[in-house]
Image: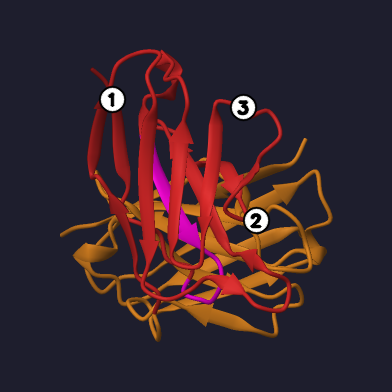
Chain colours: A red, B orange
Amino acid sequence: DIVMTQSPDSLAVSLGERATINCKSSQSVLYSSNKKNYLAWYRQKPGHPPKLVISWASARESGVPDRFSGSGSGTDFTLTISSLQAEDVAVYYCQQYYSPPYTFGQGTKLEIK
Amino acid sequence: EVQLVESGGGVVQPGGSLRLSCAASGFTFSSFWMHWVRQAPGEGLVWVSRISTDGSSTTYADSVKGRFTVSRDNAKNTLYLQLNSLRAEDTAVYYCARPRITGIPDGFDPWGQGTLVTVSS
């Protein structure tokens, strides 16, 4: 199984400042034939299901603000929120869908400092 | 509107069984692989199972293999998860989820609102 490890476990950032969450996979999730990274990022607010924010490591979903961006390739990935807003407070998860079981990271709790 | 609605959760004793349902609407259900993901109270997301478009192929997490069975009824646009030999550690909110696009693996969107399964004596 591919193990997904996020860092940090929790993060406190001031409003308007940059937030960076890292995700590392135990093996590459880059599919050689199409050069795509099978990596997604989700945001989950309390009492709600997760919401897809980024797919293919860097493709922002429709309706997601452009302050959210994803980067990385192979085994190391980053979710960046360029200017933190109050509504961004949530737990963020990465997930690989390269091979089943489609494992998630343990989550990163993002709070306002 | 694309929608997934789970049902069937509840309180069950250890060793008991439960069947969860996920009713799909707003899209061509039979064209999508479907997934179950669970989340224990206060914990993270754990992928549980997937099923192919026609139900002929299924995959499970090791933690549920041999105890849970995923199935689907494309005529009823409904996904199922049969939970047998339940343990306390199976207590969780169970979500059904659909890949964003059909044909290849992808991130999950949408998700249902979840149904809570509590295993307790």
Quarter placement of the C terminus of chain B: bottom left
Give residue B45's quadrant in the image: bottom left
For numbered disc 2, what is the local secondary structure? Answer: strand
| Residue pictured at 55% horizontal, 37% vertical | A69
Q: Reading the chain from its start, which is encountered first: label 1 or label 3? A: 3
Residue corresponding to mark 2: B98
Q: Residues within 10 Å of mark 2 (few under 14, many from 20)?
A: many
The residue stretch that appears in magenta: A91-101
Please identify, in this view, whether the residue under mark 1 or under mark 3 is nearer the observer.
3
Judge left or right: residue B49 versus residue A76. right
- Mark 3 belongs to which subunit? A
Measured as percent of width and height from the top left, residue B101 is found at 75, 56
Q: Are marks 2 and 3 in contact (CB under 8 Å)?
A: no
Q: Nearer the viewer, residue A6 or A87?
A: A6
Measured as percent of width and height from the top left, residue A19 is found at 37, 30
Q: Say which amino acid is labelled 2.
A: Arg
| Residue pictured at 23% horizontal, 45% vertical | A9
Quarter placement of the N terminus of chain B: top right
| Residue pictured at 48% horizontal, 74% vertical | A28
Measured as percent of width and height from the top left, residue B15 is found at 25, 74
